[in-house]
Image: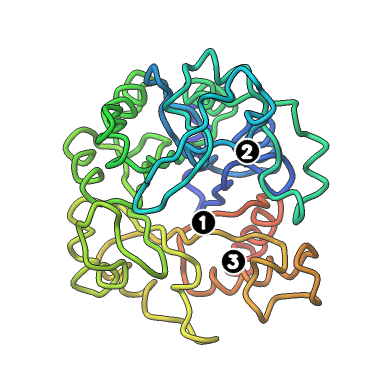
Amino acid sequence: MNADLARTRLSSPLLVIAHRGASGERPEHTLASYSRAIEQGADVIEPDLVPTKDDVLVARHENEISETTDVADHPEFAARRATRTIDGQTLTGWFTEDFTLAELKTLRAKERLPKLRPCNTVWDGQETIPTLAEIIALAKAHGVAIYPETKHPSYFASIGHPTDRLLVDQLHAAGWDSAEAPVFIQSFEVENLKRLHAMTRIRLIQLVASSGAPADGAATSYAAMMTPAGLAEVARYAWGIGPDKAMLWQGDAPSALVADAHAAGLRVHPWTYRAENAFVRARFRAGDDQAAHGDVSGEIAAALRQGVDGFFTDFPAIGVATRDASVAGEKK
């Protein structure tokens, strides 16, 4: 029954992808956040994946965990504080690859953006760091899809913790090894997606940012990858793209990206639609308070009119309502 429900959700013409769960209402990448998203009707829940010291995949946006857990309050881990260079950025803090799963499970999650999302802080200390296995079990129990991101694959491979095979083996063990499986694998890098393309039939998504280039050096820039020629190359290994939502626009006019991607046979899932004024495009803001909510529904609706195939949002309830209104309007 739940497998059938997952297929029904994925048959929606527009996928609502819960970015780190319902992270606008609960601390991100927690089972509470994912469960809230499922309650609100999200089609897909999104875990970012990083490895532990004993090579268990867990959900954190970054492997540096001081912003999202209470690790700094644990004196037994004070000596684990370290400085690392990851994808060209130097960071100091605590890193998942220095902890076993058992050690990470002693930590508790907290809100990453307390100034913008103070209401979420009431959940601080209540949730542990979930494993991919726990997220798969939750998704299967409720008939939703998952959209795992492989974080920093080149970095982890360079320190002896390659994650591509870990991820694929776990997904295949769950019974997911086809283009119809309720899974999408995403990455900002290119070479690991090409490796994954040879390992699995699961749908792959090339993430792209509005500036910069893949950390693995596989392209000169993300912009070059989004030209018609670049998109044709992406289509050789990926099912779709996940562009920064800013890439859909040139000022207030639509860019050619959605049309060009569709012409290459790629689906388009832009990221990330957040309600706070700090994140919505200027025309959708409401006042000057960065934490106040703007018109994110209007911003999503503008993207839907361009023909995107789904979208990432921190507020799946708003996303579902906006998507459903759009679909209903098209049927009139």
Q: How crowded is mark 2: few (under 14 residues within 10 Å), some or many (20 or more)?
A: many
For mark 3, give the secondary structure.
helix
In the image, residue 178 above or below residue 140: below
First in sequence: mark 1 vs mark 3 = 1
Could you tell me the amino acid type at mark 2? Thr
For mark 2, give the secondary structure.
loop
First in sequence: mark 2 vs mark 3 = 2
Could you tell me the amino acid type at mark 3? Lys
The nearer-to-camera label among 2 and 3 is 2
Could you tell me the amino acid type at mark 1? Leu
Disc 1 target residue:
14
Disc 3 target residue:
331
Q: What mark, if any, has residue 68 been given in the picture?
A: 2
Q: In which quadrant of the rendered view does residue 105 lie?
A: top right
Pick the quarter of the image with the C terminus. Answer: bottom right
Q: CB under 8 Å between callouts 2 and 3?
A: no
Residue in the picture at 52% in, 33% down: 94
Q: Where is residue 42 in the image (x, y as percent from the top left)?
A: 61, 44
For mark 1, give the secondary structure.
loop
Q: Position of residue 250 (x, y in %)?
A: 46, 84
In front here: 75 or 149?
75
Q: CB under 8 Å between callouts 2 and 1?
A: no
Along the horizontal axis of the image, is 329 left or right of 101? right
Q: How crowded is mark 1: few (under 14 residues within 10 Å), some or many (20 or more)?
A: many
Q: Position of residue 132 (x, y in %)?
A: 47, 26
Query: Is residue 1 among the parts visible in the rendering?
Result: no
Residue in the picture at 21% in, 68% down: 230
In the image, residue 162 above or below residue 255: above
Along the horizontal axis of the image, is 198 left or right of 214? left
Residue in the picture at 55% in, 86% down: 252
Compute the Cα span from label 2 to label 1.
30 Å
